[in-house]
Image (spheres, rainbow, N blue to C red):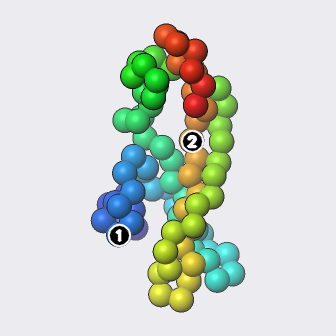
């Protein structure tokens, strides 16, 4: 499995695949945000301050009889220019 499966099968961009785990009737893909999308949505500045990690779990479609989920690990960031937190 690689990052290309997330893109070609589920049309997900900006994530880097890390691992896969199985829990009951679910397949969980673990991924992390890439630096490519770490710009402020308000002012488009690329200078950001790390404000801690966050993990979210999203439902995707089914793969065969198993429910596919994606667990995304990303960083909360604060813009140096405008102070926007996202």
Q: Which mark is residue 71?
A: none
State the image coordinates of residue 31 (x, y, percent, origin top left).
51, 54
Residue placed under numbered mark 1 in the picture: 9
The quadrant holding residue 86 is top right
Q: Nearer the viewer, residue 73 or 37?
A: 37
State the image coordinates of residue 74 (x, y, percent, origin top left).
57, 41
Q: Mark 1–mark 2 contact, CB under 8 Å? A: no
- Residue 46 in sight in this render: no
63 lies above or below 4: below
Residue at the far front: name it: 42
Q: Left of 70 or right of it: where is 34?
A: left
State the image coordinates of residue 64 (x, y, percent, origin top left).
47, 87
Q: Residue at x 52, y 13 (%)?
A: 82
67 lies above or below 79: below
How crowded pointer 2 is (Cα within 10 Å; few <14, some 14-19, many 20+) is rated as some
- Chain-order first, disc 1 or disc 2: 1
3 lies above or below 23: above
Q: Residue at x 39, y 66 (%)?
A: 10
Report the quarter where the N terminus lies. bottom left
Q: Residue at x 45, y 29 (%)?
A: 41
């Amino acid at each position: 499995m690689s990052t290309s499966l997330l893109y070609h099968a589920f049309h997900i961009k900006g994530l880097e695949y890390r691992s896969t785990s199985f829990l009951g009737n679910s397949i969980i893909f673990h991924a992390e945000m890439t630096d490519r999308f770490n710009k402020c949505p308000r002012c488009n500045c690329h200078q950001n301050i790390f404000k801690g990690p966050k993990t979210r779990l999203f439902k995707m479609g089914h793969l065969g009889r198993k429910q596919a989920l994606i667990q995304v690990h990303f960083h909360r960031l604060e813009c140096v220019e405008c102070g926007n937190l996202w």
